[in-house]
Amino acid sequence: MPSFLLEGVAQNNAVLYSLPEWTFYLALVNHEPAGVGVLFCNEKGGNLAAASTLPTFRQKGVQSALIQQRIQHAQEIGCKWIVGQASYGSVSQRNMERAGMRVAYTKAIWVRDESL
């Protein structure tokens, strides 16, 4: 995450943390914080809203475990659907697909090439 976003994200999460629709997860590896994930659920569905793994803990299954835990929790509380978002072709997309999720649509972000 770019450093200029840190304060805003922290303030946002402080507000969301106390709301019952939001669940925050902390993944530990050998009792050490390794990654985080967030789940938003209401009576209809769940959103794997955010996740991140510290660089030293990547490629150790942290995000896969966080995805599985959030999906399981969403199912246990009766969510009829579960969604997430990831950059196309990313490790996050592959982790979600391994968990049984499938691409529903892609979003293109276009920018003007000023060199033309």
Image (cartoon, rainbow, N blue to C red):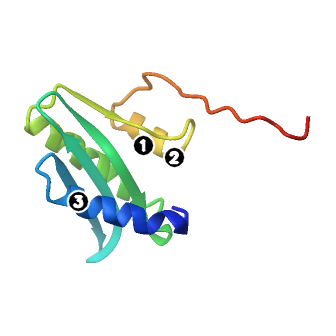
Question: Which tag is nearer the camera, tag 3 or tag 1?
Answer: 3
Q: Please state the horizontal and vertical placement of residue 89, each as a whole percent of the image.
A: 57, 37
Mark 3 or mark 1: whose residue is earlier in sequence:
3
Q: Residue at x 49, y 62 (%)?
A: 5
**Does residue 16 appear in this view?**
yes
Residue highlighted by disc 1: 95
The amino acid type, in three-letter code, at marker 3 is Val
Q: x%, y% of residue 101?
A: 35, 30
> In the rendering, at what x and y percent does residue 24 appear?
23, 57
Q: Is residue 30 above or below residue 66?
A: below
Q: Amino acid at mark 2?
A: Val
Q: Residue at x 33, y 45 (%)?
A: 49
Circles 2, 1 touching at the beta carbon (< 8 Å)? yes
Q: On the image, numbered disc 2 is attached to which residue? A: 91
Residue 38 appears at what percent x and percent y? 28, 52
Q: Residues within 10 Å of mark 3 (few under 14, many from 20)?
A: few
